[in-house]
Each structure stands twice: as C-alpha cells, then as structure tokens.
Amino acid sequence: MWLAEPQLALTSQSAMIDNKGLSSVVAEIDQMVIVSQTCDIVRDCRQRPFLLLSPVVRLEEPHAGAARRGTIPRFIPVPRLGNDYVADLDRTVTAEKSVLLNFEPKRGLPDEQWQRRFGDGVARVFSRFAFPDDLSIVLRGLVDRVKSKHDRNSPEGRALRALEEIRVTGLPSWDAQEIDIFISFSPSTREVANHVMSDEEWKKIIGEWLGRAKAQGVIRSAQGAMVPLDELTARYYIDSDPLDLDYLSLPPGTIGVR
C-alpha cells in the first residue's frame, strides 16, 4: 500500500484509480518481510502496536544478481525463498502487529551472517548521509568507471569486486565552503588486497579512479588510498561515511519485478 495522486500517477497501479486527490493504492502481495527489530516485535502490543513490513518481490536477471551483490540498495535478498526473491524497502509500510496472525511465518534468512547482512541493508537505506549535491557531480566519472568495469574479468574488475567498503570523509567538514575529500577503498584485509594485486598496482589503479573525480562547486579536491577495512582506525571509521556508489541504478521502468 502507498499514497498517490492519481491525476499525477507514477505507477500503473495508481493510474487505474478513479478518485481525485490523495488516494491509497493497494497492490496484492503474497509475502512480506518484517523489517522491525525483534525487540520491538515482542514488546507489549499496548505500548508498541505497530511494526514495519516490506513486500517480497521477484527480480529478473541481471537485477536479481545485482541485488545479491548489494548494488541496488532498495532490494535486499531473502535467500531462503530463492535466489531472485528480495525485500523491496521502497514500499515499506506500517501495520498493526495483529496483521501477522493472518500469515504463516517463514524464516527467510538462513543464518546469523545473513541476518547481519539484512540489518546492514536496512540501515544502508534509512541512514544514508546527506552529502553535498556537488559530490555526486564530482564522482560521476568514477561511478561510470565502476559501472563499466566491475563485472569484467580483468585486474580492475577483480579489484572492484574485492572492495568491501568505500568510505569518504570531507575536510575540514561537510559544512565548509571548501571541502577536500578523502576516499578509502577497502578490501576486508591486507591478505585479500595482496591476493588481487600489489601495493604499487593498487596505488596506480586508485590514482586512475581518482583522476576521474573532477573538482566541482564546494569540492576542492579528491584524494584516496587502498586501506584494508581491518586497518582503518576507529576514529576514521566514525568520522567517515560509506559511499554508496549505487552504480547499477537504472532509469525509471527498467528494473524487472515479477
């Protein structure tokens, strides 16, 4: 369910509504995923009567594969239902807990690792940092490069796939009139990084990536380095933010959901 103005319909479902003005759109959904945390679910219904639900949908390839790799943040895999089943966080709704009485519960996540991954995916969507608008322009060339090379069977493709996180910090702060950014390209460990390429090769390829980041507006410069995730300091990790390149974001209407 979502709200829409049928006169300004953006989806086929809202276009079919005859009402004028703000209307509720109801779509048939076979399965839902509980997004609320367990501690909120088990709280007394008189105190916490609501929970959050997201519909489960099936994606066509290659988008199902992209969702499994975590490159379409809107969709989080629900692996026990199948490789192409995902939770659609764009359509998360509030429901009373008694709604669950109408459904047979299923465990969609096989183990603790997947539970953490699902939780991280939810946090990724709802806690994104509001970077300056100029940053997206500065990084456009880098994003295009990642998009074109990530899946290639090449040293650059393998380097991109080895990255567990890309984190960015703005100096002296994101509120400054002039900002220098530093980007950390982070495989999980030094061992993983060395398995992909040497330190000199990492420096070279990251230099090429950063060469595509052109100063714009308040962003004065862009620097960066390969720093394994387990070598980042706690202070840097707290002061930086994950850079969600979302390099497989597609034009409206091109994602196949069935």
Image (tube, grey):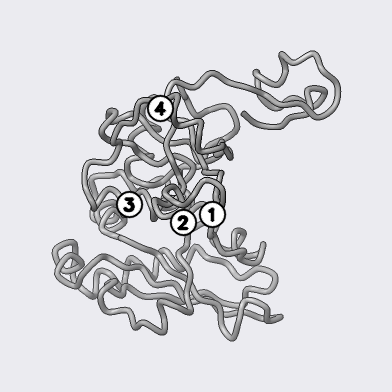
Residue closest to the eye, 112 or 215: 112
Q: Is residue 154 left or right of residue 23?
A: left
Q: Amino acid at mark 2?
A: Ala
Alpha carbon separation for disc pair 3 and 1: 14 Å
Q: Are marks 2 and 1 in contact (CB under 8 Å)?
A: yes
Circles 1 and 4: CB atoms closer than 8 Å: no
* Separation (CA) of disc 4 from disc 2: 22 Å
Q: Residues within 10 Å of mark 4 (few under 14, many from 20)?
A: many
> Compared to 244, does 49 lie above or below?
above
Mark identifier at residue 126: 1
Instruction: Pinpoint residue 122: horizontal percent, then vertical percent.
Output: 45, 51
Residue picked out by circle 4: 59
The residue drawn where x is 31% and y is 54% is 116
Position of 66 with respect to 248 (left or right) is left
Q: Amino acid at mark 1?
A: Phe
Q: Earlier in the sequence, mark 4 or mark 3?
A: 4
Which of the marked residues, 2 or 3, is nearer the chain's N terminus? 3
250 or 35, nearer to the observer: 35
